Amino acid sequence: MDKDLALLKELTETYGPSGFEARIHKLVRDRLSQSTSDIETDQLGGVVGKIGSQGPKILIAGHLDEVGLMVTHITKEGFLRFLPLGGWWGHVMLAQRVKVITRNGDLTGVIGSKAPHVLTFDERKNVLETDKMFIDIGATSREEAKSFGVQVGDPISPVCPFEVMPNPKMLLGKAFDNRAGCFVAIRTLEKLKEEGSLPNTLYAGATVQEEVGLRGAQTLANTIKPDIAFALDVGVAGDTPGMSQQEGHSELGKGPLLGFFDATMIPHPKLRDFVVGIAKQHRIPFQIDIMTGGGTDAGKFHLAYGGIPTLVLSVPSRYIHSHVSMVNRDDLDHAIKLLTECIKMLDQETVNRIKEMNGSIH
C-alpha cells in the first residue's frame, strides 16, 4: 500500500462523529505538523496548517466529523437507545456494526430492531425510525452495560475497514464524507510546500461539526478571516442503478465536482469562472454539481464578515451517510491538482479582481 492509500486508510478508519472529533483532530494535526510548524485551531476543534507569509489568505478545508450516533438511554436489559448525529436513513442502519466510544475503551455493538418476522405488512413497507432501533453490546442488564463503561452521551461511530477494490482506482471505506476532503486539504498543502514560495498565505485543514449544521465552518472562518475559501467535500454520485439524470449525473472517475448551486450557497461567480478557467487551461477533468438539497461548509464560509468568495470542490462518492462509501482515486488526485494550480495563481491582484462585483462576470 502506497503512502497516499495508507493516509486514506488511517483517515477513514479513525472514529470522529460530530462533536467528538478529538481523535481525527489529532491525526490531521499531526500530519499537518510534518509540513509546517505553524498550526492554528479554533476553540471547537477546527485545525489548519499555514504556509506562506504574504498576500491574500486562502482557506481550503474539509470537515473532520462523520455521521454518527449518541447514547441517550440504557435499558434495564442492557440495550442502548440512541439519537443520530447528522443525517441518517433508517434503511442503511439495521444489522450494522458500530463502536461505542466509552471512557473505558471502544465497545463493539450491532444496531437491531424488532425482528422482521413479527412485523405487520404495513410496518415492513415503511422505513424504520431510529427511535425503534437499539444497539446490542452483549450486555445482559443496565448495570452490566455501565460496568463496561457506557454512559449516556457517549458517541457511537460506524465500522468499516478501508479496502482497495479489485479495480484499484475504486476505494471503499467509512467516512469518506468527509475524510476525502481532509485528504485533499493535507496533500494540497504538502505539494505546495514542496514547490516553494506562494503568492499568498495558505491555510489548509478541516472544520468540525459540519454534519450537524456547519457549525465549525463559522468558527474557523472567524479565526482565519480568509480572503478566498474552498470547502472540500464529497458529492452524491449519480452513476448507480436507479438514479435519474435529474437526481444526479456525476460519475466516479470523471473528475472532481465544482458546486454551482446548493441549498446553502450560490458560489461567487468570478471565483467559479476562475477555477473553471484553470481546469480547462491545465486539462484537468471536472464535473458540475447542482444540488437542490443539502449544503456544505461553504454555506457558512461565504457569509463570514463582509462576505468571502467561496467555492465547493468535491469528489463524487457512492453511499454517503451510511457505514460505507466509495470514491475513485483519480478524482482525489485531480482535485488536488486543480486546487494546487488555482492556489498558485491567487496573488493579490487576482484576488482583488475576483472580489470586484462591478461589470459583467464574463
Image (tube, rainbow, N blue to C red):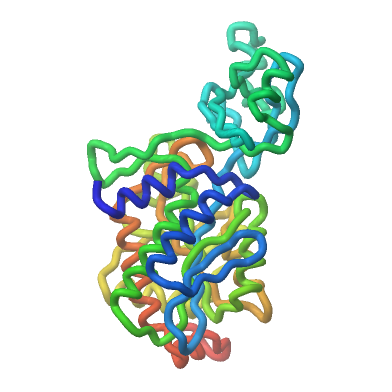
Rendered-image quadrant of the C terminus: bottom left
Instruction: Identify which residue is drawn at 67% across, 59% down.
Output: 215
Quarter where residue 17 is shown: top right
Between residue 271 and residue 230, name the one nearer to us: 230
Q: Position of residue 230 (x, y in %)?
A: 49, 69
* Vertical placement of residue 233 versus 275, above or below: above
Give the total of numbered labels. Answer: 0
Q: In this view, does 93 lie to the left or right of 151?
A: left
* Vertical placement of residue 159 versus 217, above or below: above
Between residue 265 and residue 225, name the one nearer to us: 225
Q: Where is residue 183 in the image (x, y as percent from the top left)?
A: 40, 57
Between residue 223 and residue 294, name the one nearer to us: 223
Q: Can you see residue 133? A: no
Instruction: Identify which residue is drawn at 52% across, 35% down.
Output: 158
Q: Is residue 18 left or right of residue 319?
A: right
Q: Can you see residue 144? A: yes
Q: Position of residue 40 (x, y in %)?
A: 55, 71
Residue that lies at the very extreme toward the top in this rendered image: 118
Instruction: Identify which residue is drawn at 49% across, 52% down.
Output: 178
Q: Where is residue 117 in the image (x, y as percent from the top left)?
A: 59, 7
* Vertical placement of residue 68 versus 138, above or below: below
Q: In this view, does 203 lie to the left or right of 172?
A: right
